[in-house]
Image (cartoon, helix red, strand yellow):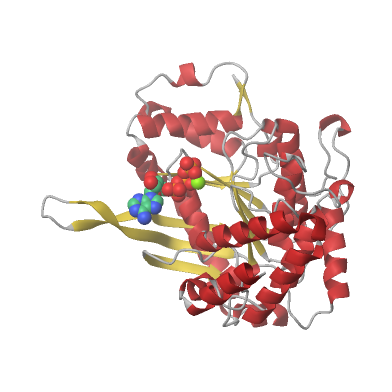
Amino acid sequence: MYAVVPPVDARKPLSMAEGKIEQLPSVEPQAGSVTVTLQSLSFIVKNHKKGADGKRSDLALVNQVSAWFEPGLMSALMGPSGSGKTTLLDLLAGRKTIGRVEGELLFSGIKPSLEYRRRYCGYVEQFDTLLPILTVREMLLYTAELKRPLSEPLENKKAEVEKLLTQLCLNSCANVRIGSPAARGISGGQAKRTNIGISLVTDPRVIFLDEPTTGLDSYTANEVMLTVQKLARAGVTVVATVHSPTAFCFSLFDRLLMLVGGRTVYFGPQDQRAIDYFQSCKPFLESDPEGLMGPGHNSAEFLVDIITAGDRDGKGPAFADAYEASSLAAENAATLQNHVAAFKDAQLPPNLAKELAVKRATVTPWWWGIYVYAKYRYDNSKHKARRHTHIHTHTHTRARAGSFDPFPSTNVVTLRHGSLSVAFYASTCLG
Ligand SMILES: Nc1ncnc2c1ncn2[C@@H]1O[C@H](COP(=O)(O)OP(=O)(O)OP(=O)(O)O)[C@@H](O)[C@H]1O
Ligand SMILES: [Mg+2]
């Protein structure tokens, strides 16, 4: 009926079927990898609608989620639209500034500060936020200059960028302008990999990707996710949301966290056990699951279809209750406790301990932000006018999205604060 897609063996060399995608160069393993543990993690906001008593009730967008994400492994976050995937990623990456967080989130046994997460977690947003006027190499160097320590010589930053270009197979388009829909530049897959490169500029221990394959053709999606798997195998902790992945892309994932209505409906390995688990959930469905899961479906489609059908039938809570009561959830709770306990008395590698103790979300002072901005704005005289518009729009769009710091030492919150914003506007307008 549907083909089960086993996870790709970590020990096997990475290559696509029939060797269509060339082997990727290997990546240096990182010291001090991070295990992320979530214990009954909830994110609660005030409901827009007032209840019968005229008061706004609490709304849990992420509801009591318990899971762990290990270094070296790829974890897929799946669920129907509106199930809380992006909210959970934002929460993990320290991007939520409103709402209440309950439960415990630990990075290698330590409660991570927002600053640590903003500084050391890579985040690849669903929509590409690149500067159309820069080339791929310039875009990465621009980010490296903003986000890597000021004390690091430019030559080192350049070397890091070159490493990233190779790692992400971007060498062939390194000098191609990123472009925009109006003035075509690099391809969609190259843009996605450039975005991944941006998130890797700071050598993150953990990387969150929100729908990295959406909008890409299946070949490019597979290529992008192979690149990400390579990073995971080098010791980075990878969590990615995926919508309708190809069978190959799905096979790259090792673990699955599935949400419906912010609640866990499955957390476990991405293999036959996931299929078996959801086979047992079929009786919850009112609609005919066989109709949704016709011949030729693969396991990714089966899993997405069954929870989407369940969600549409209003059976999301039944799926979540069934998971809570399952032996799988009990097994997971015990394993989670072991993960947490393993870090209780563990000595963290000095680098990681230092990183986890950071007090600032960024590494360079605010005036450096202005300098780098001005430098990249004026470097390319040919495109001066367009550069002005693009960089200006870009920095402000990303600042609003809470993802990019035109003044790297201040953060978006400070930028919104007022005075620096005026300085920034002045610097952009006076030129
Ligand atoms: N501040 C808020 N107040 C109330 N509801 C909110 C708020 N922010 C998000 N939501 C709701 O929370 C739910 C989860 O949103 P989220 O963006 O995390 O979903 P998603 O799983 O990423 O969906 P998609 O697959 O479409 O990207 C949605 O139903 C959304 O409307
Ligand atoms: Mg989303």
Q: Is residue 258 left or right of residue 24?
A: left
Q: Is residue 331 left or right of residue 347?
A: left
Tell me what residue is drawn at x 38 percent, y 41 percent.
Answer: 322
- Asked if residue 54 is positioned above or below residue 184 in the image, the reply reads below
Can you see residue 28? no
Relative depth, front residue between 165 and 338: 165
Q: What count of labels does the image hold?
A: 0
Viewport quadrant of the N terminus: top right
In the picture, measured across the screen, residue 127 lies left or right of residue 258, that is right
Which image quadrant is residue 379 in?
A: bottom right
Q: Which quadrant of the view contains residue 41?
A: bottom left
Identify whether 323 is placed above or below 399: above
Q: Quadrant of the C terminus?
A: bottom right
- Foreground pick, 418 / 121: 418
**Residue 51 horizontal/vertical position (percent):** 16, 51
Residue 292 in picture, x, y percent from top left: 48, 20
Q: Residue at x 88, y 51 (%)?
A: 171
In the image as oriented, which residue stretches furthest toward the front?
430
Confirm whether residue 55 shows in the render.
yes
Judge whether 240 appears above or below 247 on screen: below
Considering every residue shown, the one lying at the far left of the view is 53
Picture coordinates of residue 214, whole percent (x, y):
61, 39
Q: Position of residue 187 (x, y in %)?
A: 76, 40
Name which residue lies at 64% across and 56% down: 389
